[in-house]
């Protein structure tokens, strides 16, 4: 099942080239304080039978091509990133001073994970807005894992029980000396979408081809089988430090081939079996807005 958010916070199930609006199945009245995590994602497990019934029904479909696809998670409590999780990316980073900036990358368990600010999150219908004309902004295509229920200190053997599904992620990055959590948290620098495909439709998250092109030119091509910490181990590792909540996103890391994008570029990314996405880089640099 493919779950999306579209047209100003409608919740949908994607069926072929159509979208079924299932928003009214969800309780959207929130008590204060809101519990950590995303209130819609938290409800999906308990609504799966009703969602499947909607999929099997003759309820009207809106053409997918006519809807605006927003980030399938509206309010994660956190977006977790894995900085060096493919051997070939570690090698290219250490060989390129514009990526490594004096660091020598060794292994993930020496560097740990980072967090991207939730406010960096956009959907595939939005545009990445490059913030700085004088600094390099790179693309990183990644398999994104969306957590479905609270996960605290879980083992890798049980880790997939806590996953709702998967999406395509772009971990856009300003290169430089600062902490990754700062450089990767610029507004619009986390693309997620186009939908969440639930775990029952993905046989093995650690065996998925992933590719990215910029303006049709191949940049990244790899397979999640090359993850150093695979999906289960990443969940075990992340949840050993902090509780993961429904809607939390784990960006599993990027393979080699990272490189800069410029205003007006078009990125096409695919995680086979999850989705293909096309995301535009805005024609101009991000403009300051003051009110
Ligand atoms: Mn990354």
Image (tube, grey):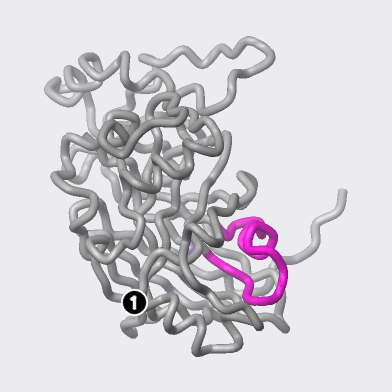
Principal SS element in the magenta part? loop
- Nearer to the camera, 38 or 176: 176
Residue 290 relative to residue 171: left or right: right
Residue 19 seen in render: no
Q: Position of residue 234 (x, y in %)?
A: 39, 48
Q: Residue at x 51, y 54 (%)?
A: 81
Please provide percent x and percent y for residue 116: 60, 52
Q: Identify the residue shown where x is 40% and y is 64%.
A: 85
Total tally of numbered discs in the picture: 1
Q: Of 188 and 54, which appears nearest the observer?
A: 188
Q: Is residue 163 left or right of residue 291?
A: left
Q: Is residue 151 visible?
A: yes
Return the residue found at the far right. Answer: 291
Q: Horizontally, is 240 left or right of 164 in the view?
A: right
Tell me which segment is drawn in magenta.
Answer: 172-189
Foreground pick, 141 / 24 = 141
């Amino acid at each position: 099942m493919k779950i999306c958010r579209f047209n100003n916070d409608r919740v949908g199930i994607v069926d072929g080239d159509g979208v079924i609006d299932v928003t009214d199945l969800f309780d959207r009245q929130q008590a204060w304080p809101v519990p950590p995590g995303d209130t819609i994602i938290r409800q999906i497990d308990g609504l799966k039978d009703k969602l499947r019934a909607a999929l099997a029904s003759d309820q009207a479909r809106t053409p997918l091509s006519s809807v605006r696809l927003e980030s399938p998670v509206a309010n994660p409590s956190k977006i977790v990133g894995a900085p060096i999780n493919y051997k070939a990316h570690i090698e290219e980073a250490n060989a390129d001073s514009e990526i490594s900036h004096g660091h020598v990358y060794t292994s993930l368990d020496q560097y740990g994970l980072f967090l991207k600010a939730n406010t960096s999150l956009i959907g595939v219908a939005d545009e990445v807005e490059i913030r700085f004309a004088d600094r390099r902004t790179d693309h990183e295509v990644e398999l994104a894992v969306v957590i479905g229920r609270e996960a605290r200190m879980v083992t890798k053997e049980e880790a997939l029980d806590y996953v709702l599904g998967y999406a395509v992620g772009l971990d856009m990055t300003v290169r430089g000396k600062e902490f990754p959590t700062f450089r990767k948290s610029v507004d619009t620098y986390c693309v997620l979408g186009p939908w969440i495909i639930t775990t029952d439709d993905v046989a093995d998250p650690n065996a998925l081809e992933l590719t990215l092109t910029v303006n049709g030119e191949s940049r990244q091509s790899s397979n999640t089988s090359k993850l150093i910490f695979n999906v289960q181990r990443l969940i075990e590792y992340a949840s050993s430090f902090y509780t993961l909540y429904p809607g939390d996103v784990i960006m599993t890391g990027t393979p080699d081939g990272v490189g800069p994008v410029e205003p007006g570029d078009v990125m096409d990314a695919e995680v086979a079996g999850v989705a293909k996405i096309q995301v535009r880089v805005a024609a101009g640099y991000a403009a300051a807005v003051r009110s």
